Image (cartoon, rainbow, N blue to C red):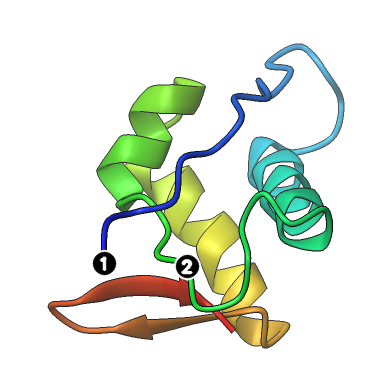
Amino acid sequence: MPAATLCYMPVDHGAPEPLYLQLAGILRDQMRDGTLPPRSKLPTLTELAGEHDLAVTTVQKAVGLLKDEGLIVAYPGRGMYVK
């Protein structure tokens, strides 16, 4: 299954809110509005980092938060999916 096509919503590098929280919020909103439907594959960490001009570690932190919230699940070697 190919990764979901996301509507690009930029993070605000000048905002006081940490970048990983902004990215987690963007992804959460896209899950809520159906842009990222259940069982859809998320882009890779590298793809998300490139799309948002972020370090991969920042994206990892955002994804980790969404995993902790039970919104996504990661399968080693297969990718990350919306629950």
User: In the displayed structure, would residue 18 be above or below residue 35?
Assistant: above
Q: Is residue 25 left or right of residue 62?
A: right
Q: Residue at x 67, y 79 (%)?
A: 71
**Which is more toward the observer, 45 or 37?**
37
Say which mark, if any, is on residue 33. none
Q: Residue at x 31, y 37 (%)?
A: 47
Q: CA distance from mark 1 to mark 2?
A: 8 Å
Give the SS element for disc 1: loop
Q: Residue at x 19, y 77 (%)?
A: 78
User: x, y percentage for residue 22?
Assistant: 75, 40
Q: Is residue 81 left or right of residue 21?
A: left
Quadrant of image for the C terminus: bottom right
Please tell me how crowded label 1 is: few (under 14), some (14-19), or many (20+) other residues with Cα within 10 Å.
Answer: few
Q: Is residue 46 left or right of residue 54?
A: left
Say which mark, if any, is on residue 1. 1
- The amino acid type of the residue labelled 1 equals Met
Say which mark, if any, is on residue 40. 2
Farthest-out residue, left: 77
Give the SS element for disc 2: loop
User: In the displayed structure, would residue 57 be above or below residue 14?
Assistant: below
